[in-house]
Image (cartoon, helix red, strand yellow):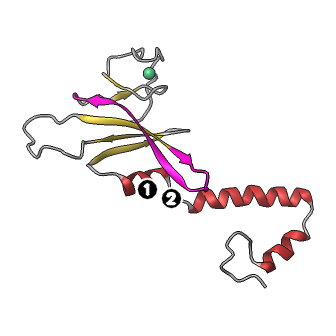
Amino acid sequence: MIAQTDRQKPPNTLIEILDDLDILTLRSVRTYLDQRIDDLRPTLPEMIRAETEGEIVDIRDRRSYTLVRKYPTSRDNSDTYPQPLSLYRVKREKRLNGKETLHWSFLGDIIEPLSIECGNCGVLLDESTTVCPHCGEELLRDEEV
Ligand SMILES: [Zn+2]
């Protein structure tokens, strides 16, 4: 018998059930398993908060990546002057061993509090901007603050 330290294989009772299934049912099981794994793994914002130093201002989800605004780790304690905010684009990266890590891309520092974000490249812009100077995307106003 294989000891329960063999984590590569599901429990025997489960294998017996799976062995009886036809290919269509197996495919639906595979889809279900992918969803379950997605539900159980830490969300991207959770992973970001777990491995980040420095103060996170906000985390915004996009379809295929996430934008993070945060202050640098070595933040000056004085509140007299506006501190630069750093903007990052963060994606999940799958390693060969199946473990997921985060890939951080530094997009730039923001000095002024800007409120409109380009939906295409994620750069933050002045509210009066209608076309992103960075990528040429036409900016749509949505309900996001
Ligand atoms: Zn843009």
Residue at image coords 46%, 17%: 135
Q: Look at the image and tell me whether residue 145 can be seen.
A: no
Amino acid of disc 2: Pro
Q: Is residue 134 above or below residue 13?
A: above
Stretch in magenta: 92-112
Q: Within the image, what quadrant is residue 11 found in?
A: bottom right
Q: Which mark is residue 42?
A: 2
SS at mark 2? loop
Q: Position of residue 49 (x, y in %)?
A: 37, 54
Q: Position of residue 4 (x, y in %)?
A: 68, 81
Q: Look at the image and tell me whether residue 61 can be seen.
A: yes
Q: Which mark is residue 74?
A: none
Q: Position of residue 40 (x, y in %)?
A: 57, 63
Contact flag, marks 1 and 2 (Cβ < 8 Å): yes
Q: Position of residue 47 (x, y in %)?
A: 44, 54
Residue at image coords 17%, 44%: 75
> In terms of depth relative to the viewer, which is nearer, 1 or 118?
1
Q: Which mark is residue 46?
A: 1
Q: CA distance from mark 1 to mark 2?
A: 6 Å
Q: Is residue 109 magenta?
A: yes
Specify whether 25 is left or right of 136: right
Residue at image coords 79%, 85%: 1
Q: Is residue 11 magenta?
A: no
SS at mark 1? helix
Specify whether 92 is left or right of 46: right
**Is the residue marked by circle 2 packed among few (<14), some (14-19), or many (20+) residues within 10 Å?**
few
Predominant SS along the magenta part: strand
Quadrant in which ligand 1 is drawn: top left
Amino acid of disc 1: Glu
Q: Is mark 1 within 8 Å of ligand 1?
A: no
